[in-house]
């Protein structure tokens, strides 16, 4: 039989569909398994990203706390370096060619030593001394203190037990002219961490250029209160740890105590250690990675680098703890999804065989249920951020919320997702928002942490908040943004205002006692205070000095409470003994105020006022406080226009002409001209006329 006959009898052979169906089933199964692994990997990456955000917030918070510790100590020394008496003291030594050429101990040395001791006590530059406490000529070792150094590195004035100046510190002074710097953390005599801060001192009335530097104020302090700032309040991860690192050539030094009990400075690892978390932190500040810590434990790590000191802050959490729930959940999910793939494959096979897809629909329902469980567990992790003590938010350059904790979105009647995309103006109001957005842009443009205060209306009352604006680096997924950490300081400011009111009430009471005993000079100190404040405001003095001028003017006659009333009301000129008694009482009045802690140089001004010959020694002499010269001018004018038992008062024009004639001699030129401008152009003449009329 020919082939044609065979084909004609039986027709062409049909291929079996079984191999093709099996191939499709295998392909669907493989694709399903690949999709499951990709999905699990994507979910793990999403959880890792959540941890990156959470750890970044904590790292930024601890970075800000440590940076605040550094800036506070620099701030204490900067205030000292700007003290006029301190600048004058070192300027005189520089002009004399060194301390060896100065004529004995200058008068300011005792005052400055007391100032350094008080500043060291309040600014954290004190520590117990070491060594035997015996009655012998044995020096006890100090590890903290404040000292004034000339440009050759020699100590001019220092607090007791101030450590000696090392050659290394002298070298730093010479290589850092005109700049503040630190001599980095190092172990002290007893192993405790010691750190040295230095701020340049410039000559009086200089341009603050390096060539004008006349010395350095150096502060040595124990860093005993630095390490607690590495601990995050409310942290829930037992393995979480913030560590300070410092690159030292080919090694990395661990500057802070470690969780395994290792003391500071006692651990150092090679910079090229494979997979070392500390090496990643130093090389990639702001990054996020999986690495291994000093105990060879796998950790999640992120870092922040300091500008002022050569440190890096590393924040890490063990992956076993951080991702334990995630891995367990994803493992279960992987198992379930693989089973779902198998079920779907079986369903397809059953559908091919039996024409039904019921089992596939059941598998899809199970997948949706598992996805819902995953989202619920992820939301629980995000609640950790809401345990922070203050309001926290991340905003973009235009003031739109990218994230916020409960303290922000809950009072606004929103939820965590609802706050995203909202503007600051919509939450805090347009006026505070304008200042906040300005601060956000300033922090981004300058790439530095800034602090601002603002007022918000909450529940019908005004609340004052102090906020830190911390710029966060841009990533490939997100642009540059700012972390805002706010604290309610309303009660703190109210308490400060209350203390100021009490101080003013006490001052008024003391002045009232003096005025009742001396009717001829009643309200004299009040007018001196009023004119002195007007002069200070004309000269644009800082608020602290302006307030000090007014308080000093009101208290200048306090010593008269010690003078017999018959002398105060005597109708005639006082004899020499009576004058000496009055002057002695004024000095005694200053001594009465010596223990009062005023905000400005009140006591210093009054002491200097009565220690000088006001007939010609307080004119344009820069050695005298400007506050003293202002009080002197105001007191002179009030005395000239006020009548006494033995003479009539001058007119305002006559008194002003007298002061103008004394400019450069007995009256400070700037203060007199400022007073004249106040009288002629600020309505002061009319106010002073009321004094003259009342006295007559």
Image: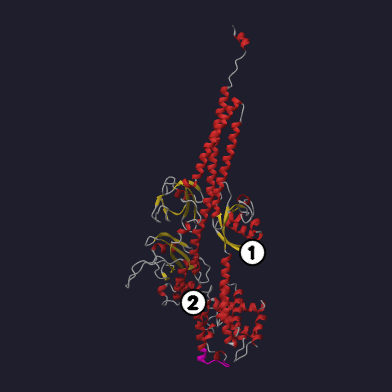
The one of 488 and 245 positioned closer to us in this rendering: 488
Residue span colored magenta: 570-579
Residue 461 circle label: 1
Are there few (<14), some (14-19), or many (20+) residues within 10 Å of tag 2?
few
Is 653 magenta? The answer is no
Q: Is residue 542 among the parts visible in the rendering?
A: no
Q: Is residue 340 above or below residue 304?
A: above
**Which residue does the numbered mark 2 point to in the structure image?**
595
Question: Where is residue 5, by image quadrant?
Answer: top right
Q: Does the segment drawn in magenta span residue 575?
A: yes
The main secondary structure of the magenta stretch is loop
Query: Along the horizontal axis of the image, is 235 left or right of 683?
Result: left
- Across and down, in percent, residue 443 comes to 57, 57
> Which is more toward the observer, 178 or 160?
160
Q: Locate residue 380, reporting x and y percent.
A: 55, 48
| Res. 302 visible in picture | yes
Q: Residue furthest top?
A: 1
Q: Residue furthest left?
A: 136
Residue 250: percent from the left, percent from the top? 41, 50
- Disc 1 packing (10 Å; few <14; some 14–19; many ≥20): few
Residue occupying the point 46% across, 60% down: 226
Residue 222 lies left or right of residue 666; in this view the side is left
Helix or strand or loop: what does disc 2 sit on?
loop
The mark that comes first in sequence, 2 or 1, is: 1
The spot of residue 420 in percent (x, y) is: 62, 51
Quarter of the image containing the N terminus?
top right
- Hey, which quadrant is residue 370 in on the image? top right
């Amino acid at each position: 039989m020919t082939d044609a006959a065979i084909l004609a009898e039986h027709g062409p052979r049909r291929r079996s569909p079984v191999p093709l169906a099996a191939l499709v089933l295998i392909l669907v199964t493989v694709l399903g398994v690949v999709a499951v692994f990709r999905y699990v990997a994507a979910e793990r990456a999403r959880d890792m990203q959540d941890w990156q955000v959470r750890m970044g917030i904590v790292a930024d918070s601890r970075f800000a706390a440590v940076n605040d510790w550094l800036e506070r100590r620099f701030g204490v020394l900067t205030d000292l370096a700007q003290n006029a008496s301190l600048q004058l003291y070192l300027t005189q030594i520089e002009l004399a060619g060194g301390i060896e050429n100065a004529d004995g101990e200058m008068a300011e040395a005792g005052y400055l030593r007391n100032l350094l001791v008080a500043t060291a006590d309040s600014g954290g530059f004190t520590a117990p001394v070491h060594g035997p406490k015996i009655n012998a000529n044995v020096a006890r070792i100090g590890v903290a203190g404040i000292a004034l150094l000339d440009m050759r590195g020699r100590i001019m004035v220092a607090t007791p037990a101030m450590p000696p100046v090392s050659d290394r510190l002298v070298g730093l002074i010479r290589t850092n002219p005109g700049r503040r710097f630190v001599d980095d953390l190092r172990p002290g005599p007893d192993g405790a961490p010691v750190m040295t801060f230095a701020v340049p001192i410039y000559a009086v009335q200089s341009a603050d250029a390096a060539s004008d530097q006349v010395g350095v104020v150096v502060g040595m302090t124990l860093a005993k209160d630095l390490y607690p700032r590495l601990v995050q309040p409310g942290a829930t991860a037992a393995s979480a740890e913030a560590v300070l690192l410092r690159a030292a050539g080919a090694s990395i030094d661990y500057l802070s105590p470690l969780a395994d009990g290792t003391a500071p400075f006692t651990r150092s690892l090679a910079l090229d250690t494979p997979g070392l978390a500390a090496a990643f932190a130093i090389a990639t500040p702001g990054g996020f990675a999986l690495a291994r810590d000093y105990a060879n434990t796998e950790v999640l790590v992120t870092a922040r680098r300091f500008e002022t000191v050569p440190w890096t802050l590393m924040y890490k959490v063990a992956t076993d703890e951080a991702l334990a729930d995630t891995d367990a959940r994803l493992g279960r999910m992987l198992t379930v999804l693989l089973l779902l793939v198998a079920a779907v494959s079986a369903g397809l096979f059953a559908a091919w065989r039996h024409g039904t897809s019921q089992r596939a629909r059941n598998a899809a329902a199970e997948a949706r249920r598992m996805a819902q469980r995953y989202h619920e567990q992820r939301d629980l992790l995000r609640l950790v951020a809401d345990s922070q003590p203050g309001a926290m938010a991340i905003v973009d350059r235009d003031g739109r919320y990218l994230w916020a904790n409960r303290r922000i979105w809950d009072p606004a009647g929103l939820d965590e997702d609802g706050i995203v995309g909202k503007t600051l103006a919509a939450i805090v109001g347009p006026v505070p928002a304008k200042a906040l957005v300005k601060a956000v842009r300033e922090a981004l443009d300058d790439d530095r942490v800034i602090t601002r205060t603002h007022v918000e209306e909450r529940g019908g009352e005004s609340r004052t908040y102090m906020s830190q604006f911390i710029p966060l680096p841009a990533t490939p997924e997100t642009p540059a943004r700012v972390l805002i950490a706010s604290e309610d300081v309303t009660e703190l400011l109210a308490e400060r205002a209350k203390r100021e009111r009490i101080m003013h009430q006490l001052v008024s009471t003391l002045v009232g006692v003096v005025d009742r005993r001396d009717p001829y000079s009643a309200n004299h100190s009040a007018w001196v205070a009023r004119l002195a404040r007007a002069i200070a405001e004309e000269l644009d003095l800082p608020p602290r000095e302006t307030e000090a001028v007014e308080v000093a003017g009101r208290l200048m006659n306090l010593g008269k409470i010690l003078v017999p009333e018959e002398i105060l009301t005597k109708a005639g000129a006082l004899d020499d003994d009576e004058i000496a008694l009055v002057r002695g009482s004024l000095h005694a009045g200053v001594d009465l105020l010596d223990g009062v802690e005023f905000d400005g140089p009140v006591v210093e001004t009054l002491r200097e006022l009565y220690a000088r010959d006001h007939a010609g020694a307080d004119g344009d002499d820069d050695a005298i406080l400007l506050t003293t010269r202002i009080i002197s001018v105001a007191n002179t004018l009030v005395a000239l226009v006020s009548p006494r038992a033995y003479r009539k008062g001058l007119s305002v024009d006559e008194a002003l002409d007298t002061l103008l004639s004394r400019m450069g001699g007995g009256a400070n030129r700037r203060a007199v001209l400022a007073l004249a401008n106040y009288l002629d152009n600020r309505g002061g003449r009319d106010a002073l006329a009321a004094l003259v009329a009342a006295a007559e």
